Image (tube, helix red, strand yellow):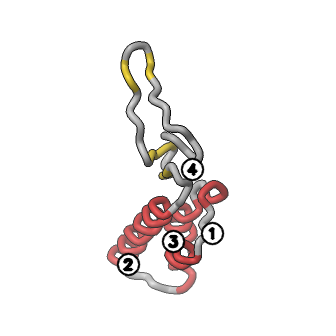
Amino acid sequence: MHMGYNNTCHRYSLNVSILESVSEEKDLGVHISNDLKWEKQCSQAVAKASKVLGLIKRNFADRSKETIILLYKCLVKPHLEYCCPIWNPHYIKNIKLV
């Protein structure tokens, strides 16, 4: 992956095979693009959190405030906060999405 705007996109090789150049990569569960924008990571985190919220809604009959808060903190919040210091959204559209 070539990062930056002024980066000359050289072709790299390992032994005799030429390495493929990609514009996006997933490492340790975090999606990173070559322009360092985090739209995909934000949308993936929100999608995972929404799936877990749907699972909670379908499978738990007790919907008291205490139970929902506990389930949210234990099951949903980790998906939204995973590696957040790295991909912390700074665009308004990503902040609203999360």
Q: Which residue is rendered at x = 43% and y = 62% of the image?
A: 44
Amino acid found under the numbered disc labelled 2:
Lys
Give the CA separation, mark 2 to mark 3.
Answer: 10 Å
Q: Earlier in the sequence, mark 2 or mark 3?
A: 2
Amino acid found under the numbered disc labelled 1:
His
Q: Earlier in the sequence, mark 4 or mark 1?
A: 4
- Across and down, in percent, residue 37 comes to 54, 59
Q: Nearer the viewer, residue 79 or 96?
A: 96
Q: Earlier in the sequence, mark 3 or mark 1?
A: 3
Give the CA separation, mark 3 to mark 1.
Answer: 27 Å
Front of the two marks 2 and 1: 1
Q: Which residue is rendered at x = 59% and y = 72% of the image?
A: 91
Q: Which residue is rendered at x = 60% and y = 54% of the image?
A: 83
Give the CA separation, mark 2 to mark 1.
Answer: 30 Å
Q: Are marks 4 and 2 in contact (CB under 8 Å)?
A: no
Which quarter of the picture shows residue 36?
bottom right
Front of the two marks 4 and 2: 4
Give the CA separation, mark 4 to mark 2.
Answer: 45 Å
Give the CA separation, mark 4 to mark 1.
Answer: 20 Å
Q: How many marks?
A: 4
Which residue in the structure is indicated by mark 2?
Answer: 57
Which residue in the structure is indicated by mark 4?
Answer: 5
Which residue in the structure is indicated by mark 3?
Answer: 71
Amino acid found under the numbered disc labelled 4:
Tyr
Residue most extreme to the top: 15
Which residue in the structure is indicated by mark 1?
Answer: 90
Amino acid found under the numbered disc labelled 3:
Leu
Describe the element under mark 4 as helix, strand or loop.
loop
